[in-house]
Structure formats: structure tokens, C-alpha cells
Amino acid sequence: MRAQPHFEREALQADVDVIQQAYEALHPELYRYNTPASMRAHFAALRADLDGHRILADTYLALARFAAQVRCGHSYADFRVESDGGLGGKLAA
């Protein structure tokens, strides 16, 4: 079995910063099913889920759980492998 890619805490937390900034600035229906307070709690939960060294599978699951909380059919974790050597997936929005 091939070893999974892993990610360091600092990189994951920086990624959460980018995700939060992008969602808050760009998602047109972010507060349709969530209040600003509940979204802050969802972002805090994502930070907690990614607070440490994580393998790809754990990172994907944390992102998928977060995206499900947004309750938008356009926001989901996509596990397809990207050619740029990144996460191996992306959070679509």
C-alpha cells in the first residue's frame, strides 16, 4: 500500500485562512442556511479538525464535513487528483 501524502499543521491552518477569506468574500449564499455566528463555529471546527499533522484522507474528511455544513450544492470536497501536486483534491465553490 502506498503511503498517503501528509500535511503539516501550519500549512493546513494557512489553508483554512484562505478558505475562510474566500467563502466570506465570494460565496453568494453563505448565510442562506447559516448565521454568521454558526459559520464562525464551522470555521473553528475545521481549524480544530486540522490542528496538527494530517494525512490526505483525514484532511479530505475534514474539508468534506466543513463543506456539508455550508449546505450548498455547489460547495463540496472533490477528491480528484490535481496535476499541480497539491492536495489531491480541492474544495469546490
Image (cartoon, helix red, strand yellow):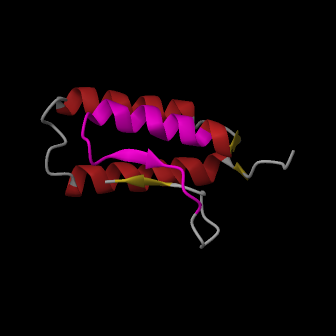
Left-right relation of 93 to 29: right
Of residues 30 and 9, the one nearer the viewer is 30
Q: Residue at x 83, y 48 (%)?
A: 3
In the image, residue 56 above or below residue 39: below
Q: Residue at x 55, y 35 (%)?
A: 61
Residue 60 lies, in percent from the top left, at 56, 42
Q: Which residues are magenta?
A: 59-81
Q: Residue at x 64, y 45 (%)?
A: 9
Q: Is residue 13 magenta?
A: no
Q: Is residue 69 magenta?
A: yes
Residue 64 lies, in percent from the top left, at 46, 37
Q: How many marks?
A: 0
Quarter-wise, where is residue 58 in the image?
Answer: top right
Quarter-wise, where is residue 31 in the image?
Answer: top left
User: The C terminus appears in which quarter of the rendering?
Assistant: bottom left
In the image, residue 18 above or below residue 72: below
Of residues 88 and 26, the one nearer the viewer is 88
Of residues 78 and 27, the one nearer the viewer is 78
**Hey, which residue is sitting farthest bottom in the picture?**
84
User: The N terminus appears in which quarter of the rendering?
Assistant: top right
Q: Residue at x 34, y 27 (%)?
A: 41
Of residues 87 and 80, the one nearer the viewer is 80
Quarter-wise, where is residue 43 in the image?
Answer: top left
In the image, residue 21 above or below residue 59: below
Residue 90 lies, in percent from the top left, at 48, 55
